[in-house]
Image: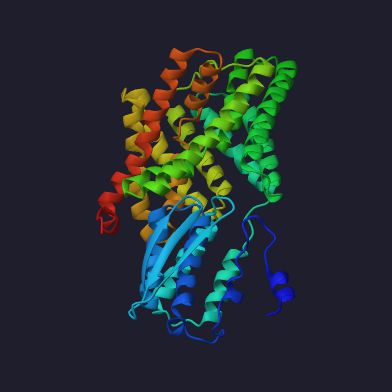
Amino acid sequence: MSEIDREHHLSEKHHMKILWEEFFKSDNNTMAQDATLVEKTSIVGRVGIMLLSCGTGAWRVRDSMDTVARTLGITCSTDIGLVSIEYTCFDVDNESYSQTLSLPATGVNMTKLNEMEKFVRQFEKGHGEWTIGQIHKRLREISQQKSAYSPLISGLSSGLACGGFIFLLGGGLPEVICAFLGAACGQYIRAIMGKHRLTLVAKIAVAVAIACSVYFMSFHVGEILFHINHDHAYGYIGAMLFVIPGFPFITSGLDMSKLDMRSGLERLTYAILIIVIATMAGWAVATILRLHPGSMPKLKIYPGTLTCLRLLASFCGVFGFSIMFNSRPQMAATAAVMGAMANTLRLSLVDYAQVAPALAAFIGALTAGLLASIVRKKVGFPRIAITVPSIVIMVPGLYMYRAVFNFGITNINIGAYWIVEALMIVVALPLGLLAARILTDKKWRHAD
């Protein structure tokens, strides 16, 4: 190939795009098991990096890479982070080949994850009797899948999630409506910015600022037209809860439990970064608009009615978050049913049995994990696609914001109280899923 042709095929992106099909020397009719070690290794790595781009944890990525490697007759050893994979493959001829692959950004796409897991199962079931061309074609089809939903649908699902979320935090109809409008606008703008590949900091800060501002304006319209109580303004926190990094928070705990410390710590750092950006942006907007956290008007609802409404709000919240995670409606509905039961149980334990919030969160996550192990066998969805969305609504975003707000005005004691409350729950959630996984998954409970 001439220098001009080489330059024509080179990526101009900062994270240079790998042209996988041009990398292979064997033709497309070559059976994968007859390919060279370099080509087999590249197939394993491409599967791994595509799975990593979906937001799943290190254990699942490694398990899938191992499955493909075994099917191809090679051994794979891999180290996985948040956006990169370093791995080496060995064959029986005393040869090895190493690659390092990285992503420009991370995200969550449960539909693509489902397709990737299907591909791995089919590849294993077929004993690797695929040609290189068939593998290229299937992986290209999956990688070229666009987001399952438009920015408008993503925004509306965010509004639905945050509307349900703020009700579960004690908000009434005014808070639900204003949070819906604020979160919908904020997520819509974030999705538009994402399509233009803007940086994480800008997306989060702008989205939160817009969400809080829209809540504030919506509240004042309601105050003028319907003379609603000024205390309903305290629900503005609900408008920004769509940025809660539930996936990296939960998967970081699961990864660290399997001693995938690099992936776990990187995911935790990423989640903390988002929380800091979001809460600081929310604090800045609240300071400008002279808003501050406070107690919303207490709902006067009978316990039975409240429990039914919590079931509905939890369903809406989990369904909305699942759609934001690019889950198909059936997958989102499955997670929503599980989340409704688990989260309502958690809230009932706190309110009616005086169980500590952290312990109740553990029980709620454990319940979601046990339900997922039952449901997964019947529906075939990835476990993480139905467990994590079902407990994202339990992540204490309100506590985190209150902590940062109080730190910002130097109320250190109060801020420390809220951050400890948040940390206890954040730790309890992955522990609950971990306990359920150990009880129900033979492969997971062993360290080999």
* Residue drawn at point x = 72 percent, y = 19 percent: 220
Residue 279 point in image, percent of width and height: 56, 28
Residue 444 point in image, percent of width and height: 30, 55
> Based on the displayed image, in which of its 4 quarters is residue 69 positioned?
bottom left
Residue 200 point in image, percent of width and height: 62, 42
Quarter the C terminus occupies = bottom left
User: Is residue 339 visible in this depiction of the protein?
Assistant: no
Quarter the N terminus occupies = bottom right
Most distant residue in the bottom direction: 29
Residue closest to the eye, 213 or 82: 82
- Identify the coloring: rainbow
Residue closest to the eye, 402 or 152: 402
* Residue drawn at point x = 38 percent, y = 55 percent: 59
Q: Give the left or right position of residue 36, taking residue 227 as reference.
A: left
Q: How many labels does the image show?
A: 0
* Residue drawn at point x = 66 percent, y = 16 percent: 228
Residue closest to the eye, 16 or 269: 16
Q: Is residue 429 above or below residue 408?
A: below
Residue 87 point in image, percent of width and height: 42, 63
Q: Give the left or right position of residue 364, taking residue 147 as reference.
A: left
Q: In this view, does 244 lie above or below 305?
A: below
User: Is residue 281 visible in this depiction of the protein?
Assistant: yes
